[in-house]
Amino acid sequence: MAGAPKGSHNNPNGRPKKERALTDLLVKELSHTTELPDGTKISGKKLIARNIVNAITTGRIKFPKDGEESVISIKDWIDFVKWLYTHVDGQAKSEFDVTSAGEKINPYMAMEASELIELAKKIADASKE
């Protein structure tokens, strides 16, 4: 039946929304509680945050299943620090100044002489009309 109102085909709530966003799925999963080997219960989010902070401040990371602690490499430590700064402060801006001593560059200065002559002719012709 074309043009039928929503829910009139034995589906009163309409089509269910699809969970597509990876972020939504990760947030849902990370909100679950995990039990550590010492019996402590902690959310996945807190566990990740704790491991990131420990990795950066001590150079060690503890895996939740067996409580085993590992030393991270210098490269891993640098990657953790870069990741943290990117996600806390945001991505570094990669702007560059296309100016000359703070002054905007005149686009006509970059033109060849022949291009300037052609432009001048077009302006002169347009002013005669």
Image (cartoon, rainbow, N blue to C red):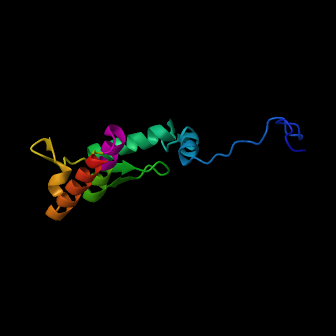
Question: Percent x, y for residue 20?
Answer: 61, 48
Q: Point out the residue furthest to the left here.
A: 101
Name the residue nearer the viewer: 79 or 22: 22
* Stretch in magenta: 81-91
Of residues 37 and 45, the one nearer the viewer is: 45
Q: Nearer the viewer, residue 109 or 75?
A: 109
Q: Residue at x 47, y 48 (%)?
A: 64
Q: Quadrant of residue 87?
A: top left
101 falls in the magenta region: no
Residue 8 on image: x %, y %: 88, 37
Residue 44 position within the rendered picture, expressed as x and y whole percent measured from the top left: 50, 41
- Taking 85 as reference, is 11 left or right? right
Specify whether 11 is left or right of 110.
right
What quarter of the picture does the N terminus occupy? top right
Name the residue at 69% across, 42% down.
17
Left or right: 48, with 35 as reference point: left
The overriding secondary structure of the stretch rendered in magenta is: helix
Q: Nearer the viewer, residue 42 or 115?
A: 115
Image quadrant where residue 103 sits? top left
Pinpoint residue 11: horizontal percent, then vertical percent: 85, 39
